[in-house]
Image (cartoon, rainbow, N blue to C red):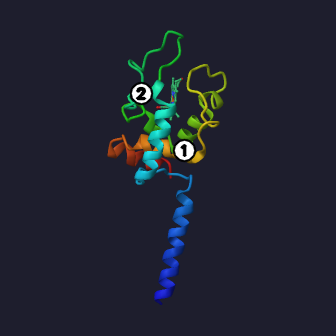
Amino acid sequence: MKKILLISTLLISLSSISYSDNHYPITRDSQLMIARGKIAYQNNCVSCHQVNLSGAENWKGVDEDGHRKAPPLNGTGHTWHHDDETLHKIIKYGLVGIISDYEGKMGAFGDKLNDKDIDSVLAYIKSFWPDDYYKHQINLSK
Ligand code: HEC
């Protein structure tokens, strides 16, 4: 009996490992993932979204080229209205790869970041969100 219990516990934990391997919802439970995401964020996103994820100043306006400015990712904007699949795609393919005729500045990072890096960046971003937005977005991503 004990053996059966052990095996089924093992199977359950194995299936949850493969589930969490690059799939949704992405949680903020792993400190390791958040730390990895922070590095990727600092190397690739800070120039526009800022070090504290607050986005460009007056982000609702447009820049000197008439393009939209980088929005905050820290929960004060609307990033948490998008599910994980959408957010992953925005980062991997850029808005340029999703919206036809897009002329803005959010480029694609698929050549610099692999899927795991992108999910880690999302875990890092989510670590800034207030609990209720986080929970809402987790439900959205299931
Ligand atoms: C060159 C500037 C620039 C860089 C670098 C950049 N972004 Fe963006 N990002 C933008 C802009 C501008 C938008 C708004 C897009 C628009 O509406 O045209 C945006 C939008 C987004 C959105 C959608 C947010 C929302 O609330 O809808 C996400 C998510 C995002 N960026 C994540 C990232 C991540 C993660 C990185 C780094 C891997 C990154 N961005 C790097 C400029 C940038």
What's the residue at 52%, 46% (across, down)?
119
Residue 53, x across and y down, in percent:
40, 31
Residue 21, x across and y down, in percent:
56, 56
Q: The disc labelled 2 sits on which kind of residue?
A: Gln
Which mark, by number, is residue 50?
Answer: 2
Which mark, by number, is residue 117?
Answer: 1
Q: The disc labelled 1 sits on which kind of residue?
A: Asp
Image quadrant assignment for residue 97? top right
Where is 107 relative to 139, above or below? above
Looking at the image, how many numbered discs can be counted on the residues? 2
Where is 3 relative to 48, above or below? below
Q: Distance between the residues labelled 2 and 1?
A: 19 Å
Residue 47, x across and y down, in percent:
47, 25
What's the residue at 57%, 35% (across, down)?
90
Crowd band around label 2 with a 10 angstrom C-alpha radius: few (<14), some (14–19), many (20+): some
Crowd band around label 1 with a 10 angstrom C-alpha radius: few (<14), some (14–19), many (20+): many
> SS of the residue at dot 2?
loop
